[in-house]
């Protein structure tokens, strides 16, 4: 198998396993056995090892010497850390993206927000939410920064799904609309400030039993 094919298969495996981990189908602490994963995907161990490395870089698994790979847990401290990192890095990306944001891009971001408002489940909402963030940040032209932010979004999605798995009510995202209004008015620092505050809310209040999830942002 060529290196290119290995890389493509590694991406496929890592994405599939990431989806299962984020959704809770594979629980924290579960060991991922290289042989089992290779058999499932009809792959050699080479792309499986690369897939595990990708998952580790996203903070979804932990590699332990002589014990293999297991699905990582997460603590309130880790949730806050991810939220604070996202706040700082997304504000940085937005400041650099702002001069390149066109009306067409902002219209697409607004449509993504409307799609999130209409979402019937948390997975659909998270996809729309991530689309919004990617649209307004991608023009920054800083691929390493965007890759780091994307990995942090993956971690955020896992926190989100763990809290909202039992029930779902789509929130109306006023923060997204405030960010768009500020960007359309050329108020970049206001937009960056709202964005930073917006993403930090993922680490503030864990959902309590019986509390509707609409109060939690992502």
Image: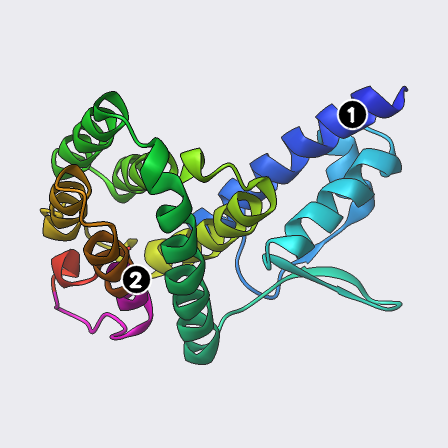
Of the pair 94 and 54, the residue shown nearer to us: 94
Crowding at label 2, few (<14), some or many (≥20) Cα neighbours within 10 Å? Answer: many
Q: In this view, does 26 lie above or below 4?
A: below
Q: Residue at x 69, y 46 (%)?
A: 54
Secondary structure at numbered mark 1: loop
x, y percent for residue 141: 51, 36
Q: Which residue is drawn at 42% across and 60% down?
A: 86
| Whole-number angstrom distance, CA of label 2 to CA of label 1 | 43 Å
Residue stretch in magenta: 198-211
Crowding at label 1, few (<14), some or many (≥20) Cα neighbours within 10 Å? Answer: few
User: Given contact means CB atoms under 8 Å apart, are the residues at marks 2 and 1 in contact?
Assistant: no
x, y percent for residue 170: 14, 45
Q: Residue at x 18, y 48 (%)?
A: 179
Task: Left or right? Give the position of 78 relative to 157.
Answer: right
Q: Residue 42 carries which label?
A: 1
Secondary structure at numbered mark 2: helix
């Amino acid at each position: 198998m060529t290196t290119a094919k290995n890389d493509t298969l590694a991406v496929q495996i890592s994405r599939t396993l990431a989806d299962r981990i984020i959704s809770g189908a594979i629980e924290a602490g579960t060991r991922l056995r290289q042989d089992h994963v290779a058999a499932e995907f009809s792959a050699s161990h080479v792309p499986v090892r690369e897939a595990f490395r990708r998952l580790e870089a996203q903070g979804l698994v932990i590699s332990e010497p002589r014990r293999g790979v297991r699905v990582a847990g997460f603590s309130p401290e880790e949730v806050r850390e991810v939220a604070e990192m996202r706040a700082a890095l997304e504000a940085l990306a937005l400041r650099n993206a702002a001069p390149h944001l066109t009306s067409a891009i902002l219209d697409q971001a607004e449509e993504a927000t409307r799609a999130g408002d209409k979402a019937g489940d948390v997975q659909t909402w998270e996809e729309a939410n991530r689309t919004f963030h990617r649209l307004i940040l991608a023009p920054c032209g800083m691929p390493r920064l965007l890759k780091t932010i994307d990995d942090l979004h993956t971690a955020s999605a896992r926190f989100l799904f763990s809290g909202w798995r039992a029930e779902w009510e789509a929130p109306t995202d006023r923060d997204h609309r405030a960010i768009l209004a500020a960007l359309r008015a050329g108020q970049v620092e206001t937009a960056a400030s709202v964005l930073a505050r917006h993403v930090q809310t993922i680490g503030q209040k864990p959902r309590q039993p019986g509390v509707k999830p609409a109060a939690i942002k992502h």
